[in-house]
Image (tube, helix red, strand yellow):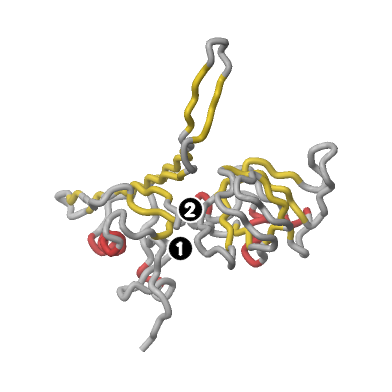
Amino acid sequence: MTDFTTYSNILPDPNNPIGNAGQGGVNQTTAGLGYSSVSLTSEHKILNSRTNSGRLVSRELSGHQWKISIGYNPMLRDDFERINAFLVQKRGSMTPFFVSLPQYKAPQDSTFATFVASNTFTNSATGAAGTTNLLISHSSYSSSNGVVKPGDIFTITDDTNSNHKKAYQVTRVEKTDESLTGAPAIASTALLIHFNPPLQRAVAANKNINFNNPLFRVTMAGDATEYELNTNNLYSFSLKLEEVQA
């Protein structure tokens, strides 16, 4: 008999299997299907107004949100029910879960992806809520280990704030030999990353910056699950998800 310590809370996919008892990473034959399509929307709710002279006045009305649409190829019932049962367990939009998007599972630079698969960067100083850049470092890092690129996604593991589950996207990267003139020097073991959205919560120094398999915390966008069954006994199914925070 094999016991397990926790139920999987990640939408089943080829990299995140789920067993009949709800356990994750135990039985590789129960991996979920891959996606036929993925759509990611970055949404800022901005209020714009213009003065009579044409000056633009803008302000953000609420926090940033990622929206995700996932499509599947027609499925056999066994494949469909594995995914459907996971979602039914969540009772529509009531219970959050995590989703791994294949295009962001690893950084774009394969050399950097290999490095962060076994090494974790930390932020060198406290980041206040609303900050849009962090200096991150690792004692073993050098330029030979590649570099994170604009477009990569990361999350933050903060042992003093377990509710910080926001996903962030890198927009600019500065390094020791490529940085803004007049700005403080960047050590060879460090990178200055700019990102969007701004930090949702304050982050103390020396917290883990996760570039390897960052997960989006989401719920279903609606409270109903629906599928279609065709004459070939194949199930058609798609998902709309919205990022949520604790």
Residue 52 spot, x, y in % from top left: 53, 11
Precedes in sequence: disc 2 or disc 1:
1
Observer-nearest of 140 and 224? 224
Observer-nearest of 40 and 233? 40
Residue 12 spot, x, y in % from top left: 38, 62
SS of the residue under disc 1: loop
Residue bearing the label numbered 1: 15
Q: Residue furthest left?
A: 231
Observer-nearest of 4 and 47? 47
Residue 102 spot, x, y in % from top left: 48, 53
SS of the residue under disc 2: helix
Residue bearing the label numbered 2: 102
Indicate the quadrant where residue 41 lies: top left
Q: Residue at x 23, y 53 (%)?
A: 235
Left or right: where 9 falls relative to 223: right
Left or right: where 206 falls relative to 89: right
